Amino acid sequence: MQFRFVHNNINVLDLEKSLNFYKKALGLQEVSRKQAEDGSFILVYLGDGIGTHQLELTWLRDRTEPYNLGDNEIHLAFTTTDYEAAHQLHSEMGCICYENPSMGIYFISDPDGYWLEVIPAK
């Protein structure tokens, strides 16, 4: 038996705002979309155009309250070939929420408060 890692899921309150954020901040593009016949939910799968792993954004029509992220100890990580340019972009976007210069990493926060780690490619 063999398993393959396919995607991570996060729930979002404003799908368009999240899609715009992930495109601008990380270059993720919509790969596919599934919408419930009754309009109660939309699933959008995002990819980086390089690997097969995807990020699934779930929007629920009836959800109006922000999601409780607890201590927000879970995060996704992204590498970049141009760390300085990425840091400048994220600074301009105002989405950097934590920096650790001694480790050479920083985190950005998406519109729903999920943390995303940015690591320079080796």
Image: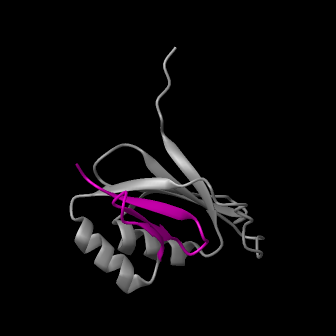
Identify the residue at image location x=58%, y=65%. 114
Residue closer to the observer: 32 or 78: 78
Q: Position of residue 109 (x, y in %)?
A: 52, 71
Q: Quadrant of residue 12?
A: bottom right
Above or below — where is 72 with respect to 84? above
Residue closer to the observer: 62 or 118: 118
Residue closer to the observer: 47 or 117: 117
Q: Is residue 90 visible?
A: yes
In the image, the segment drawn in magenta is 96-122
Q: Position of residue 85 (x, y in %)?
A: 24, 73
9 in magenta: no
113 in magenta: yes
Above or below — where is 44 with respect to 85? above
Above or below — where is 74 with respect to 89? above
Residue closer to the observer: 34 or 88: 88
Q: Position of residue 75 (x, y in %)?
A: 54, 55
Report the residue that reaches farthest toward the front: 102
